[in-house]
Image: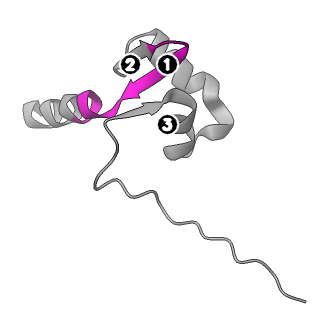
Amino acid sequence: MDVEETTNELPDLSSPPPMMPWRDFANWIRIGDRHDVVWGWIRNAYIPSQKYGKQMMVNLTALNSQLLEKGERL
């Protein structure tokens, strides 16, 4: 009997897309089982987001910039 191999590889963060649908973002950072947490971050403006049509997108470029700035101030 063959058993399917599952990998627990981390997502490639070296070149993320500039924008990502918020649910995909939750899955990407591995809290897909807690989509409500990411939605709360968006609602409270903890992470940059933009609505395009009906889709709420996380702005990964702006998020990366914010994290880099915060790291420089520490």
Numbered-mark total: 3
Label 2, secondary structure: give it.
strand
- Which residue matches tag 2? 49
Question: Which quadrant of the rendered structure holds the C terminus?
Answer: top left
Stretch of the chain drawn in magenta: 52-64
> At label 2, which amino acid type do we have?
Ser
Amino acid on which the number 1 mark rests in the picture = Met
Residue type, numbered disc 3? Phe
Please give the name of the residue rendered at 44% of the width and 24% of the height, measured from the top-left corner: 57
- Which class describes the residues within 10 Å of circle 2: few (<14), some (14-19), or many (20+)? many
**Pair 3/1: label in front:** 1
Sequence-first tag of 3 and 2: 3
Query: Disc 3 marks which residue?
Result: 25
CA separation, marks 3 and 2? 11 Å
Indicate whether 66 appears above or below 11.
above
Do tag 1 and tag 2 residues touch (Cβ < 8 Å)?
yes
Which residue is disc 1 drawn over? 56
Measured from the top left, where is residue 17 in percent x and y? Answer: 34, 42
**Any magenta on residue 57?**
yes
